[in-house]
Amino acid sequence: MIDTPLIQLVDVTKTYHLESGDFTALDHVSLEIGENEFIAIMGPSGSGKSTMMNQLGILDVPTSGKLYISGRDVAEMSALERTHMRRDAIGYIFQKFYLIPLLTAYENVEYPLILKYKKRDTTGKAAALLGQVGIDKDMSAHRPTQLSGGQQQRVAIARALVNDPKILLCDEPTGNLDSRTGYQIMDILCGLHRDGKTVILVTHDPKIAEYAHRTIRLVDGRIAES
Amino acid sequence: MIKGDIFFNLSVRSVRLNFLRSMLAAIGIVIGVVAIASMGMLGTNMQLEVKEQLSSSANTIVISSDTVRMGPPGFTPSSSTASGVTKSELTKITSVVGSNGTVIPIYSTNSEFTISSVAGRGPIYGIDPDDISKFLSLNKSYGNGTMDLGVNEVLVGSTIAEEFNLRVGSRIKIGSFSSSSRPELRIAGILNPRGTVADGVSTDNGIVVNSKWYTNQYGGENEWTQVNVIVNDVDNISGIESALDAKVNTNAKTPAVRITDATSQLETETSTLGTVTTFIMAIGGISLLVAAVSIFNVMMMSVSERIQEIGILLSIGTEKGEVRRMFIYEAFILGLLGAGIGGISSMIIGYSVVDAMIGTTAYFFQPASILYVPAAMFIGVAVCVISGVYPAWRASNMDPIDALRSE
C-alpha cells in the first residue's frame, strides 16, 4: 500500500493578472509533503513564498495544476468545504499574529472551537492550550493590544492548535519578535512537531530554518532546492 | 441563543468601540420612529374621538330638503322663501317610522346674538319643547335648568356658556347687533357638550329655542330644515331608510328629501383622517430613509475599518454567512438602540401631542393607537437591518488574502 502524501502539489502554477501584465508567482511547482514533516520554505522577496503558503493554506486556488490535501483535490471542493478544511485541518501562525482585536486572548483561542462546534467551549481545551504555551489565566482575559508580541504569538499558536489540525502553517512566526522570544516560539513549534504535527515554516532567517528537517528554496516561483 | 453567540458579542463590542458614531447614526432611527409612531397615534386618536362622538348619534337618520334653508341676517321673516321638509312629508315620515323610532322635526338657521353687549354668532335650532329631552341633556353644573322651554326661553350650548360665563337665568338677545328689534330671552338651561355629531344639531356653539318662538320670528311654519328620526334598534336603520326613501322620494329623478345617517359621515370623516394620517406618516417615514443612509454609511465605515479583522476571520475558517451575520447583528443593534429610544420617546411625545391637539388622551392606550409604537419600532429595526445587508455582503465576499494585507 502506497502512503498518500498529506500535501501534494502537481505542476502548480499561480498567475496574477496585473495592469502591467501577467505575473507568475508559482511556476509549475510539484512537491510532496508527508505527515509529521518539519519544512522550512526560504527564498528572496518575490520568490513565491507567500503565494505558496496561500496555496497550502487553501486561501487561494492554483491557476493550473493540482493541489491535494489529505488526498482531496482542492479545486474540486466547494468554497464552504475549503472553509471547513481551513478551520479543521490547518492551523495558521502569522508574522503579525493576526489575533481578533475585539476578543480577549481566551476568546481568540476559543473562537475556532465555536466555529467548529457552534457552541462555547465547555471542555476547558482553550484554557489548557493557553496554559501549555505559557499564558496564565490573568493574561487570558486581556485583549491582544494589552499583550506583548511574544504573548500574542503564543496566543496565536494556541488558537492554531485548538481544533487539533494536522498541518501548521507558520508565516515568519518569529519575524516580529526579539531573538530570545523567537527561539522560545521555535521551541514550542519543535515540540508540536514532536507531537506529530506537520509544520511548514516560511522564514528569511537561516538560523530559524535550521530547526526544520527539510528546506525548500524558491527562486522566481520555481523550486530551486528541496 | 443570540446572547451567547460570539458573532453577536463581536457586534456589541464593535458598537461599544464606536459608541458615539453609532449613537449619532441611531438618532436618525429615533427621529423616524418618533415621527411615525406619534403621527400614527395622533391620527388614530382623532379617528377614535370622531368615531366615539359620531357613534352617539349612530341611531339617528337625518332627513333634509335638498333646498337648503337660509336664514336672513338678523331676522326678517318675510324674506324667507326657501322650502324645507313639508308637513305632508313629515306625515309620511311619521307613518313609516311608526313605533320603530321617534320623529323630531327641527328648524334651524344661523344668527347673531348678544350677551351683555358682546356679540356672537351661531346656529339657532327651533325644536318642540317635548322633543328636546329626547336627544339633548342639561349640564347641571351651571344651575338647575329646565328643558320645558317657554316661548321666551332658550337653551345654550356649553361652549357659549363657558365663553360668556353664563348661568341659568342669564339673558341673551338674538338678532343682528344693528337691528332695531332684538328680543331678549331667558336662558333656561345649559346643554351638555356634544362634540362632533352626525345628526346635524351641533349645539355646543348653538342656541335651542322653542319652535313656536322660532316660527314667529323667522316664519316658515311647517317647513322644517330637517327631520331627525331616532330609531329604537340601530340594526333596523337601513331598512327604515329604504322605507322612507320609497315613501317620501316618490320621484326618483328629483328626490324630495335627502336621507343620511351617521355611518356615511363616519366613513367620510375616518377616511379623510386616515388619508391625512397616512400622508403625515409618510413624511415621517422620509426621516427613516435619511436614517437608512446614515446607518448604511456607518456600516460601510465599520467594514472598511475592520478589513484586516475580516481577513483573519475568513482565513481561520469563518463561513461567509457567519461574517454576514456579524455585520447584520451590528445593524440590528443600532436599530434596536434607535428603536428602543424612539419607542420610549414616542410614548412621551405622542402622549403630549395627542393631549395638546385633541384635548383628551382617553384613547391613547387603546390597542389601535398604542400599536403604532411597536409597529414604528419594528420598521426602524427593519430599516437598519436592510441598510446593513449590502455592507455585510461586501464583508463576507472579501478575498481573505487581500483583506489580511490591508493595513
Image (cartoon, helix red, strand yellow):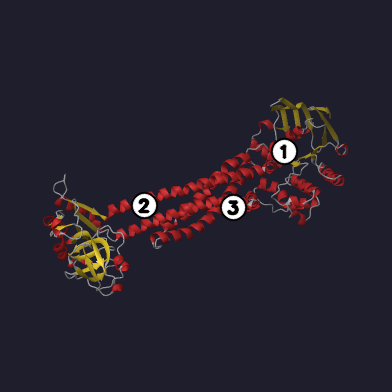
SS class, disc 2: helix
The type of residue carrying mark 3 is Met
Cα gap from disc 2 to disc 3, whole angstroms: 35 Å
The amino acid type of the residue labelled 1 equals: Arg
Label at residue B23: 3
Give yes or no for contact between labels 1 and 2 (Cβ–Cβ under 8 Å).
no
The circle on residue B273 is 2
Q: Quadrant of residue A202?
A: top right
Q: Tell which of B372 and B222 is nearer to you.
A: B222
Three-letter code for the amino acid on which mark 2 is drawn: Leu
How many numbered dots are placed on residues in this image?
3
Image quadrant in which the C terminus of chain B is located: top right
> Which comes before the other along the chain, label 1 or label 2?
2
Question: Could you tell me which secondary element the residue under label 1 belongs to?
Answer: helix
Label 1 packing within 10 angstroms: few (<14), some (14-19), many (20+): few
Disc sitting over residue B405 in the figure:
1
In percent of width and height, residue A176 lies at: 81, 43
Mark pair 1, 2: CA separation = 59 Å
Q: Position of residue A159 (x, y in %)?
A: 74, 46
